[in-house]
Amino acid sequence: MTTDHRQRRRRRLRPRRSGGLRWWGLLAVVSLLWLSRGLWLPPAPAPQLILVLGGDVERERVAGALAKRDGLPVLVSGGSNPEYATWQFGRQGLDVGRVQLDYRATDTLSNFTSVVDELKRAKVRHVLLVTSRDHMARALRVGRIVAGSRGIALTPVEVPCGNRCMPEGERKVWGDTARAALWVLTGRDLKRWAAEHFGPLLEEVQDR
């Protein structure tokens, strides 16, 4: 066997490096940039808006009190019906022009994905996030990924829920965290995409 033949054979037998190392390297760089963002991003200004996540009218009442105290506008995502919300904010002394009611959201992830690009265009960089105490951990984790990807800082304002509190499991929290990360990477809610494309198939399997 000639020397050239042996070298060619050695090259063929040498295992190829997978692209996995490159992806891990990229992930490490992105993670480092994310963790060090406080060093290179400009500091957030004072809060510019109150974002209320729907699900409990007490959240809207607390947001109204905050808005009256601090003079901030209010954006309610997926909240109570327009008649009740208008009445509630009106009795707290807020005029209609300071309150925006948005009903596009269907869950915690879309509470953020439906509004963040509009907030970015409006140059909002710091938001007070109002939701119930038992919902805050998941909402804050999702929000800091989605809103953070648009340079928007969140400051939590917990609304007490007393004996109505229903602590959320880690599985639910991490599930929505993964959905939020995938939305930032792909621009899609993959859970909704899967339901639209494979929902009938999954229902058929479950019925068997």
Image (cartoon, rainbow, N blue to C red):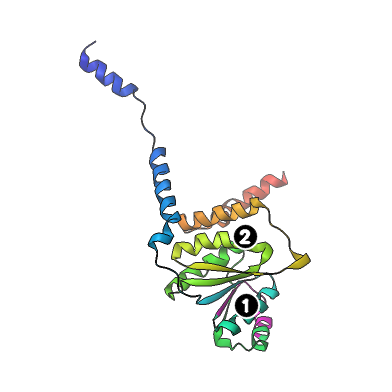
Give the farthest residue toward the front: 39
Q: Position of residue 176 (x, y in %)?
A: 59, 56
- Point 44% across, 71% down: residue: 120
Viewer-side residue, 34 vs 55: 34
Q: Position of residue 6 (x, y in %)?
A: 26, 16
The amino acid pointed to by label 1 is: Ala
Above or below residue 100? Residue 177 is above
- Point 55% across, 52% down: residue: 178
| Secondary structure at numbered mark 1 | helix
Rendered image: mark on residue 22: none
Q: Earlier in the sequence, mark 1 or mark 2?
A: 1
Above or below residue 161? Residue 169 is above
Number of numbered discs = 2
Q: Position of residue 140 (x, y in %)?
A: 58, 62
The C terminus lies in which quarter of the figure?
A: top right
Rendered image: mark on residue 137: 2
Residue indicated by mark 1: 63
Q: Position of residue 71 (x, y in %)?
A: 55, 84
Distance Cα–Cα, label 1 vs label 2: 18 Å
The amino acid pointed to by label 2 is: Ala
| Residue 150 lies in the magenta stretch | no
Q: Please give left or right for residue 6 compared with residue 169 in the image.
A: left
Mark 1 neighbour density, 10 Å: few (under 14) some (14–19) many (20 or more): many
| Secondary structure at numbered mark 2 | helix
Magenta segment range?
Answer: 74-86
Above or below residue 23? Residue 116 is below
Viewer-side residue, 123 vs 199: 123
The N terminus lies in which quarter of the figure?
A: top left
Q: Please give left or right for residue 159 compared with residue 18 in the image.
A: right
Residue 40: which quarter of the image? bottom left
- Point 70% across, 69% down: residue: 160
